[in-house]
Every structure is written in structure tokens, then in C-alpha cells.
Image (cartoon, helix red, strand yellow):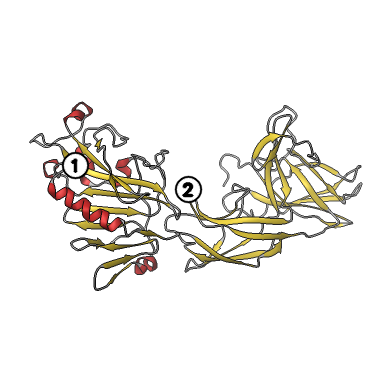
Amino acid sequence: MKMIGLILCGLSALSAAQNDQSRIVKSQTAEKFESPYFTMTIVSGWAVTPSTDQRVRITHGKYVLSIDPIYTHASGVNCGRFGELANGLPSVGTVMANVDQPAGGFECSQSSSKPTIVNKDISLGNLYTDRSKSENGCIFPASGQTVWFGSFFCGEGSESEYAITLGYDTDNVNELPEKDSAELKNVFIDVVEMLKTLDLKPPILISRISPASAPVGTAVTVYGSGFNVPGFAIALVFNDFPNNPMPPPAIAGDGKSLTFNIPNSIGTVSCQSGRVLIGGLCLPIPPDHVNINDCPQKSDGSSNFCGIPLSPGTYKISVQAESSGVSSNSASLIVLPIPTPVAITLLYPNSFVKPGDAITIHGVGFTPTGNTVKIGSSVVNNIQSPDRKTITFQAPISSGDSFDYGNRVYQSYVSNSNGESNSISIDYRIAPGQR
């Protein structure tokens, strides 16, 4: 766990159903707050304020403890900018009113050399500002006193990435609490007591999949929870090739199940001479490597994009909230073989294709003449294959429904008198003005 001085928040709204799940359970000794993402005991004098997203605000007068169990890094910096995390908290804007944007928060902040320790994973830094920052365009109280305007913690926990901040809700810099005042120390005591009870829940969880083994093209249902994380597109991912194009899964309204089809093929790329793609990296070719269907470089030595079948075997899959860094646990899926008399083992290029490009297919079961290639609903007839292992043809104009919404991705097949092959996806380049 790292202590990092800059953070970000700002995510979209929870559904009404998820808001209904947030509740405070009263006991004889404490009030326990529970949401779909975490539980925490609320000490006397603090109150949970209504929220329209997954973040929770716990207030005591003008003090605001904000817990964001899921966040993204919009600034491109791990934990983002302090101003983003504060999400427009008036005290931050007041202190940094004259700072050029985008700001990082450090322009006006000093940090205590002794952070407030909650446990081994959570420590709150004490952000304040004083005259040492006077040349940075920061605003100070008329009295010249050293003032506190926010604490922070940013972490990557076992359940998710999350951020915790404590701020003071005022747009008047003269109202900011004095650093190390008795009032502020008491607030920190309360906050530490609450955060010690913080229990994060997995935002996305897989409990089982059905069927657990099936051939390519089969519809598989994943059961669990959190498949409707607010504000994020949900993706089913094969962990070994997370960037492989796949249609968005169909998600149940309650977020407890989703269905996807096992892809027929995966994308790969060519490597420089003497190297081969292994586990997503171009590594030196192993001594025992059999070069049958490695993705070849283009004739000019530049990188090529290829498609290969999804081989039978056991794969780890997970569910991800895209661009959030939040992912579920992994589950095993066994892909079963489907023997076919005609089979594609390699197709290239299979990405950024435009009509007229030369496409090469390697495989088995091809006939010397009479081979037909179908891409989407476009057909190329009577292609020759003298060696019965290779087909070369010009890419037709794309047509038909794309299997990946928003992109021109089609399934391609070879058929002849022996039968029809497996399919490989092929991605057409979208010309300017096309949709």
C-alpha cells in the first residue's frame, strides 16, 4: 500500500436501487452504515448525508469525511489531483483561488511530518497552508494564521481502488480551522475511530459460471454481484488477452448476472526477427518453439495484425468496470474443441483492413479450387489453394452486422465441398465520415 499525495474522485450516479441498499443499522452502542461497497460505524455527532453516487459523505458541522470506494485517474496520475478528489470542496477552491489550473494541490499545501495513522493500510495526511506558500498564488486568512483545509488518503486495496478525504466546507478562508487546534485534533480522533471500522466490499464479484465448459460460440452466464457499477461500461475479459475485441455482455437488471459468447478467435501481432509473441510480450524464440502459425511481419518489416483461433483449454475470465481499475475475482472457463474438416489457423491482416487489401489465410481442408470466403455478409467465391493450406484474396467491401457494436468487426469463414471452417474476427478500418 502506497501513501500518495494526490487523489481524484468524481464519478457518476448510483441507480435508485443501489441507493435503497445504503442504510444505517442502529444498535445499542453504535450506528453501523452499510452500502453496496462498504460498511463503517458512525460515531456520535457525525451524520451520513444523502448521496447520488457511490461516494459517501459523513459530516460533522462543516467537516466532511468523504469515502470514494471506486475512482478513476482522469488526470493521468495515480490518485489524480487533490482538487479533483475534493470535487469542488469550497475550502480547496478558496485556498487555491489564484493558482493556475490544472493544479495538483501541492501548490498551496504543506503536509504534516506525522500523518494520522489509522491502521497499516490507512494513514491520513494533514494538509495545511502557511506563509511559506505565499509566492504560489495561494490565499491566506487576514490574520496570517496557519490554516488546515484538508487531509487525504489514496489506496489500492484488496477489494478496489479507493480514496478517503477529510475536508472543511467553507468558501471563506478566514473560517478555516487553525492547524493543530483542539477542535481539529478532536475531529481527527473521531475520524480515526470511524475508519478503523471501515470494511470494503468487493465492488464486482463472480460466484459461478454456467456452463463451466463449452466450445467457442457458446453463450455462458456469469453469476455474482456488482455487474452494474454506476457510470462504467462493464466488460467480460479473458485475462490472458484482455484487449481482444468482444461484444458487450448482456447484463441483468439487478446486476447479478451477465451473459456473453465465447469468442471464436483472438488477435495477435507480429514481432521483430528472432522474437515471438508469448503472453502478450515479444520474447526470444524458445528452442522448442514450432513456427507454424506465428503472425508474420509485413513485407516492409513493419508490424502486422493477425487472427488465430481460440485454442481449447482452461482460461481465466473476469468482469471489469472499464477505465476504473476495478476488476472482479477470476473464474475458470474450459473451452472445448470442435473438430472441423475445414479449419482456419491464421488470418492476416485482421485489423485496420480496407477493401482491396490482400488477405492471407492459413489452414487445413482447403480445396485446390472452389473455396469461398465470407466476411460478414460479403462473399468472395472460387478462390484457389494449390497447396490446400493457403488462401489469398482481396478484402471485399464490408457489409452486414458487426458483432462488436461501434466498430466494423466481422466474422470470417472459409467453406468448400469439405464443409465450413471455424471463424476468425476481422476489423475493417472506418473511413472518414463513416459510422
Can you give x and y, in whole percent of width and height, for residue 134 in the image? 18, 28
Residue of label 1: 148
Can you give x and y, in whole percent of width and height, for residue 126 in the image? 25, 42
Tell us which disc is closer to us: 1 or 2. Answer: 1
Depth check: give the residue in front, 48 or 348.
48
Q: Mark 1 is on which residue type?
A: Trp
Residue located at (24% from left, 73% from top): 28
Depth check: give the residue in front, 82 or 2.
2
Which residue in the rendered view is the most extreme toward the left? Answer: 143
**With 141 as the anchor, is 32 left or right in this view?**
right
> Which quadrant is home to the N terminus?
top left
Dot 1, crowdedness within 10 Å: few (<14), some or many (≥20)? many
Which of the 4 image quarters holds residue 428?
top right
Which residue in the rendered view is the most extreme toward the bottom? Answer: 28
Q: Is residue 374 above or below residue 127?
A: below
Q: Secondary structure at mark 2?
A: loop
Can you give x and y, in whole percent of width and height, for residue 286 in the image? 75, 36
Q: Mark 2 is on which residue type?
A: Ser
Q: How many marks?
A: 2
Dot 2, crowdedness within 10 Å: few (<14), some or many (≥20)? few
Tags 1 and 2 in contact by the CB under 8 Å rule? no
Which of the 4 image quarters holds residue 279?
top right
Residue 323 is marked as 2
Q: Is residue 300 above or below residue 395?
A: above
**With 78 as the anchor, is 279 left or right in this view?**
right
- Of labels 1 and 2, earlier in sequence is 1
Residue 97 is marked as none
**With 90 as the anchor, is 85 left or right in this view?**
right
Q: Is residue 118 above or below residue 290?
A: below
